[in-house]
Amino acid sequence: MMPPGARSRGVAVLGSTGSIGTTALRVIARQAGRFHVAALTAFANSSLLSEQVAATGPAYVGLVSPNGTMPPASWRIGASSLVEAATREDVDIVLNAVVGAAGLDATLAALEAGKRVALANKETLVVAGELAEAACARSGGEIVPVDSEHSAILQCLGRRDRADVARLIITASGGPFRTWTADAIGGATLADALCHPTWSMGRKITVDSATLANKALEVIEAHFLFGLPYERIEVVVHPQSIVHSMVEFVDGSVLAQMGVPSMELPVLYALTHPERVRDDGVPRFDPVAHSPLTFERVRLDDFPALRLGLEAGRNGGAAPAVFNAANERAVALFLEGKMQLADIAASMDDALARLGSMSGRDKQALLAADAAARAHVTARAERR
């Protein structure tokens, strides 16, 4: 039940036709009255976007890339639609599920406008975490994470003082190659990489999960979200994907947030934080059915993308932006069949060696580093 006199809060869903976006719309539909869809944007899937518009009736619709289609005249076209949707007066919460660095401008604009950003676009903080922190400080905007790992940490921390925290433990499923040898991983196919054992996600993030690049992105994101140094953030493999992350406190106590591998709960909590509301559509956890729960150490030597990302985070400056951009471009080439899986980490390593020391002093410098890394990976692939 909503409190007496409470009004429905408008949500802009950026990237509404992707995995997180469609999940968010299901959650919002179940919470009708508490939330409503004020704006929708998609990259290119105009057919599904049309269905979503018909079902939710948003006041604003944006399509980044029509790809030859003829969208309705009322729709806004182009990348600027992301910022427009994120800064509307009728939008209280911006759920940013845009893939990659393309979501950066919308996140920063929403924060400058004092909005809550329910952030599924981890690349925003990887590329420009300090800029996002500054925008929050200036405007009163806030970031509430949607990623299950960061949502878990937020739920475990509550309002506790960060001085009470000894370390954050981020869990990783290990992906499809958890038990593979390094040689076997090097020869893996696209079909192998897209066969995730526990999560159903978009193609890009599924490949990131296979290489463990996504865990590096999550560690960098956690550093900015929770204000802890990298030496107090660890990664552990948890194949069942039931424990989403843990927080160890200075007295040795450890709190873990658990649940079935579904994005419905973290999406819901990002909308309602710090409150909890009933939602019978969120899958329930059965401790017996989901047992046993096991944990393993990460094999950094066999998953170099994770090691490279952690090093980039510690180095700071433009290095995280270079790491992210090189990964995005390399994964795109892998998905197009123009690169082998092992070439993803090799491309990131080469880009970081050549470009990781570029300036990261402001947004323009970070975008320059981003562009340089993408161009470097493309040129490297063309030479091979």
Image: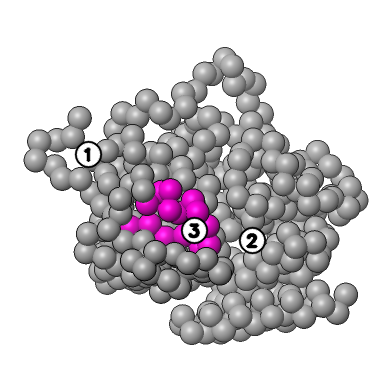
Q: What residue type is labelled 1?
A: Gly
The question of residue 41 being in magenta is answered with: yes
Residue located at (31% from left, 28% from top): 278
In primary-sequence order, the first of circles 1 and 3 is: 1
Q: How far apart are marks 3 and 2 (CA)?
A: 37 Å
Q: Quadrant of residue 323?
A: bottom right
Q: How far apart are marks 2 and 1 (CA)?
A: 42 Å
Q: In which quarter of the image is the N terminus?
A: top left
In primary-sequence order, the first of circles 3 and 2 is: 3
Residue located at (51% from left, 63% from top): 43
- The kind of secondary structure element at disc 3 is helix
Q: Name the residue under label 2.
A: 310
Q: Mark 3 points at which residue?
A: 46
Total labels drawn: 3
Nearest the eye: 131 or 17: 17
* Residue 76 located left or right of residue 309: left
In this picture, which residue range is highlighted in magenta?
39-53
- List x then y, in percent, for residue 192: 79, 45
Give me the disc on residue 355: none
Q: Nearer the viewer, mark 2 or mark 1?
A: 1
Q: What residue type is labelled 2?
A: Leu
Q: What residue type is labelled 3?
A: Ser
- List x then y, in percent, for residue 76: 38, 69
